Image (cartoon, rainbow, N blue to C red):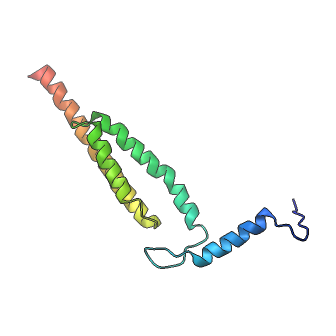
């Protein structure tokens, strides 16, 4: 498919190319000071669903937490907002790994609570 552009008209593709060119020349990574690559924004966009999924899993697992869901929600929200400024993919991956570890700890505490409740009901 070819775009026919007459004098005085601008195609969408031409606007996109100008935008990308000016964006690449002016954008610099805050953490490293290096210019961002062409696909840096795409990589960050691809990580957003996994970050949201982790938050949802933490909230879901927080239903069984001994201190209650409100405590888990407050702490998770604070941690996620504390890391909201991260733009480097490696830093985001490191924060995601810490979040997954915290999720496993949360699930372990919940399992332990259920085990103790079961033991009290049937063996004490």
Left or right of 121: which side holds 20? right
- Residue farthest toward the top in the current orientation of the protein: 122
Left or right of 20: which side holds 37? left
Left or right of 123: which side holds 86? right
Position of residue 19 measured from the top left corner of the image (x, y, whole percent): 68, 70
Residue 18 falls in image quadrant: bottom right
Q: Where's the N terminus, which quadrant?
A: bottom right
Count how many numbered circles sit on residues in the image: 0
Task: Tell me the residue at 30%/46% (across/down).
Answer: 74
Task: Tell me the residue at 15%/21% (across/down).
Answer: 121
Q: Where's the C terminus, which quadrant?
A: top left
- Residue farthest toward the left in the current orientation of the protein: 124
- Residue farthest toward the front in the current orientation of the protein: 8
Image height of 71 relative to 99, above or below: above
- Give 67 or 101, whichever is nearer the viewer: 67
- Give 22 or 100, whichever is nearer the viewer: 22
Image height of 64 relative to 26, above or below: above
- Give 6 or 90, whichever is nearer the viewer: 6
Task: Tell me the residue at 67%/74% (across/down).
Answer: 21
Position of residue 54 measured from the top left corner of the image (x, y, whole percent): 41, 47
Position of residue 57 measured from the top left corner of the image (x, y, whole percent): 39, 42
Image height of 70 relative to 33, above or below: above
Position of residue 50 measured from the top left corner of the image (x, y, whole percent): 47, 50
């Amino acid at each position: 498919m070819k775009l026919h552009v007459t004098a005085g008209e601008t195609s969408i593709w031409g606007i996109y190319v100008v935008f990308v060119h000016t964006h690449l020349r002016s954008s610099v990574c805050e953490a490293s000071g290096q210019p961002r690559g062409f696909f840096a924004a795409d990589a960050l966009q691809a990580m957003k669903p996994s970050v949201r999924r982790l938050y949802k899993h933490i909230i879901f697992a927080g239903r069984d937490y001994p201190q209650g869901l409100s405590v888990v929600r407050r702490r998770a929200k604070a941690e996620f907002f504390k890391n909201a400024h991260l733009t480097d993919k490696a830093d985001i991956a490191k924060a995601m790994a810490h979040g997954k570890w915290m999720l496993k700890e949360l699930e372990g505490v919940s399992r332990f609570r259920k085990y103790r409740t079961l033991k009290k009901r049937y063996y004490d």
